[in-house]
Image (cartoon, grey):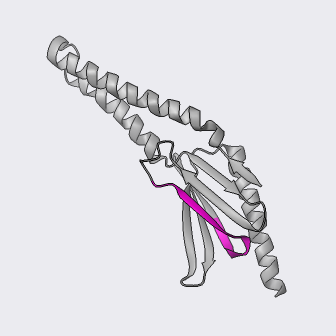
Amino acid sequence: MRLSNRNKTSVYSFINTLLIMLLAAGAGAYFLEERRFNILGKESLLLIAAPLFLIILFYLNGRQIFEYDSDGEALHFRNRNVIPFLQKPLSDEFPKYKLLKFEVINMFFMKRLYITISSKNTGTTMLKYEISYLTKKELADLRFSLNKVVKTNKEKSVNI
């Protein structure tokens, strides 16, 4: 199964550009307010604080683009940001039989995927992916696919 929200890259880029423009316009309005008009008083700080809060919220949600591929004998996860230099992109590929368990954590407005895989050196390794920008259907499909792999792995380990 393949799952990707890469087709929404232009939407996320537009939102990012809009937020940056909003911050720039707010900063310009703040300086005009302070130097020239002085109508709002102390509330003029909201002209900068509100767009800055929205930008921080946008980036705290995590990497926007998530790709998953379970075709073949390997699982492939990719997670990257719309702006490539902000965060290092994640890319992991491992055989399906190494997947032990997974967990989706749903915090207030953030979603995280924790994958536990078997490792020769340490026993187990935990991989973390940010999936906040997946739709409910995409998230349900991801859970279904990962459950299927985990179930198959448990059945194989019992038969051995």
Q: What residue do we see at 15% from left, 17% from top?
A: 35
Q: Which residues are magenta?
A: 88-102
Asked which quadrant contains residue 21, the reply is: top left
**Residue 38 appears in the picture as rendered:** yes
Measured from the top left, where is residue 29 in percent x and y? 27, 19
Vertical arrangement, residue 22 with respect to residue 89, above or below: above
Q: What residue do we see at 80% from left, 84% from top?
A: 158
Q: Quadrant of the N terminus?
A: bottom right
On screen, residue 64 versus residue 36, left or right, reads: right
Q: What residue do we see at 45% from left, 30% from top?
A: 17
- Residue furthest to the left in view is 35
Measured from the top left, where is residue 12 in percent x and y? 54, 36
Of the pair 33 and 8, the residue shown nearer to us: 8
Q: What residue do we see at 50% from left, 46% from top?
A: 81
On screen, residue 160 versus residue 59, left or right, reads: right
* Picture mark count: 0
* Residue 91 on the magenta span: yes
Q: Which secondary structure class fits the magenta region best? A: strand
Measured from the top left, where is residue 110 in percent x and y? 52, 49
Of the pair 101 and 95, the residue shown nearer to us: 95
Asked which quadrant contains residue 47, the reply is: top left
**Residue 106 appears in the picture as rendered:** no
Q: Quadrant of the C terminus?
A: bottom right
Asked which quadrant contains residue 137, the reply is: top right
- Residue furthest to the bottom in view is 160
- Residue furthest to the front in view is 85
Vertical arrangement, residue 152 with respect to residue 66, above or below: below
